[in-house]
């Protein structure tokens, strides 16, 4: 009897996401950092009161920022696991396939490298534009403090690789290229889901300075997930991209090595050229390497996978909302309002 109940429960589990899931998870992903920020502010104030240290000393310390980043990543992974558990969704829905053709591993690493070199100078040009209009630029990412993103010793370098490269590559990809991207596909198609999930990823950072880069990189990572059929591809791209940033920063701190270029007129032409070359390479890969991975083939693979779970395909059709989920609109409105509020405050102050 218990065996039959277990089989019935397994049979009823969903192995797909819908746009309702995408909207809800994005909303949770927006709220979670706020709750953690409040919690760690209270902890910081408590430490200041007990130790007599300055508030800035505590919040910028390596121990404090490391714990904050680890807790944030673990909380995101926890959100993913709890959401799947509560909604009875199979882990297979996220399409985390480690077993891929070796070409996919090579391409993911190459795309991670190409994306960094192809986008970083364009982002530098965008920063120069923001500086011209008087927007206050951050030296380091607000969600990745300088104590971790600017390693000056080998020990901090390895710690930074773990905290700022590995953990985000897992936690952020599970949410954005896992749940959110896959949930948007049926409602918005492959192209729509690529750009909408990338927009959500960019808005999640809540910083004007960090709007363009996450959108471009998020689009690339969403594309490779759909073309390779595995979330692990975007995890590799994400990790390689962050790792190279940390590596070059470390090398510039301990040697005279630097990738920075002077902001002359030719720098902006080079930035546009490298951006164009990056997406030209991605187009060629899409056209000639992944040409067999058309949208129709990917949909066919998805339907076959649903069929393996005994009728999940029919469940998908029955349970799928007829209109775009209200949570998509709610989460987008909340993210835009938060984005405007945070950046207006930064601009004014």
Image (cartoon, rainbow, N blue to C red):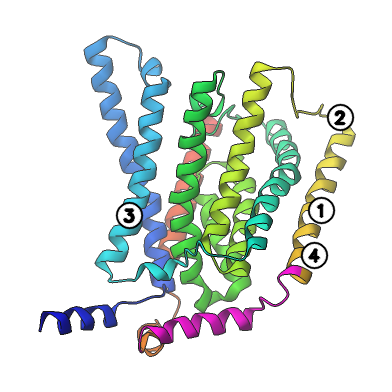
Mark earlier in primary sequence (2, 4):
2
Counting from the top left corner in percent of width and height, residue 165 is at 52, 40
Q: Which residue is mark 3?
A: 79
Task: Kindly state the secondary structure of the residue where label 1 is placed.
Answer: helix
Which residue does the image show at 82% across and 53% down from the upper left? 277
Mark earlier in primary sequence (4, 3):
3
Q: Is residue 145 magenta?
A: no
The image quarter in which residue 241 lies: top right
Task: Kindly state the secondary structure of the residue where label 2 is placed.
Answer: loop
Q: Which residue is mark 2?
A: 264
Q: Which residue is mark 4?
A: 284
Residue 8 appears in view: yes
Q: Which residue is mark 1?
A: 276
Counting from the top left corner in percent of width and height, residue 163 is at 45, 36
Task: Kindly state the secondary structure of the residue where label 4 is placed.
Answer: helix
Which residue does the image show at 39% across and 15% down from the upper left? 57
In this rendering, which labeled residue sits more in front, label 2 or label 4?
A: 4
The image quarter in which residue 291 lies: bottom right
Range covered by the magenta-colored residues: 289-310
Residue 143 appears in view: no
Q: CA distance from mark 2 to mark 3?
A: 45 Å
Mark earlier in primary sequence (2, 3):
3
């Amino acid at each position: 009897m218990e065996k039959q109940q277990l089989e019935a429960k397994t049979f009823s589990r969903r192995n797909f996401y819908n746009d309702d899931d995408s909207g809800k998870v994005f909303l949770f992903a927006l709220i979670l950092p706020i709750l953690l920020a409040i919690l760690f502010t209270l902890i910081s104030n408590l430490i200041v009161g007990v130790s007599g240290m300055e508030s800035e000393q505590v919040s910028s310390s390596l121990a404090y920022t490391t714990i904050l980043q680890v807790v944030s990543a673990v909380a995101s992974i926890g959100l993913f696991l709890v959401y799947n558990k509560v909604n009875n969704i199979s882990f297979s829905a996220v399409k985390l396939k480690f077993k891929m053709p070796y070409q996919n591993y090579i391409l993911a690493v190459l795309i991670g490298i190409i994306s960094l070199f192809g986008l970083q100078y364009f982002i530098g040009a965008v920063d120069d534009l923001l500086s011209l209009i008087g927007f206050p630029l951050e030296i380091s990412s607000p969600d990745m403090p300088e104590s971790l993103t600017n390693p000056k010793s080998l020990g901090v370098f390895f710690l930074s690789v773990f905290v700022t490269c590995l953990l985000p590559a897992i936690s952020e990809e599970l949410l954005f290229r896992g749940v959110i991207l896959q949930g948007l596909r049926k409602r918005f198609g492959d192209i729509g889901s690529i750009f909408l999930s990338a927009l959500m990823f960019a808005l999640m950072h809540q910083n004007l300075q960090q709007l363009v880069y996450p959108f471009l990189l998020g689009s690339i990572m969403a594309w490779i997930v759909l073309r390779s059929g595995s979330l692990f591809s975007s995890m590799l791209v994400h990790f390689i991209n962050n790792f190279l940033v940390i590596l070059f920063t470390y090398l510039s701190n301990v040697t005279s090595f630097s990738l920075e270029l002077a902001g002359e007129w030719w720098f902006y032409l080079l930035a546009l050229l490298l951006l164009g070359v990056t997406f030209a390479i991605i187009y060629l890969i899409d056209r000639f390497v992944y040409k067999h991975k058309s949208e129709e083939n990917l949909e066919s693979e998805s339907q076959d996978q649903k069929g393996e779970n005994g009728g999940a395909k029919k469940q998908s059709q029955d349970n799928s909302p007829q209109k775009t989920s209200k949570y998509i609109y709610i989460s987008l409105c909340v993210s835009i309002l938060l984005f405007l509020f945070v950046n207006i405050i930064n601009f004014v102050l």
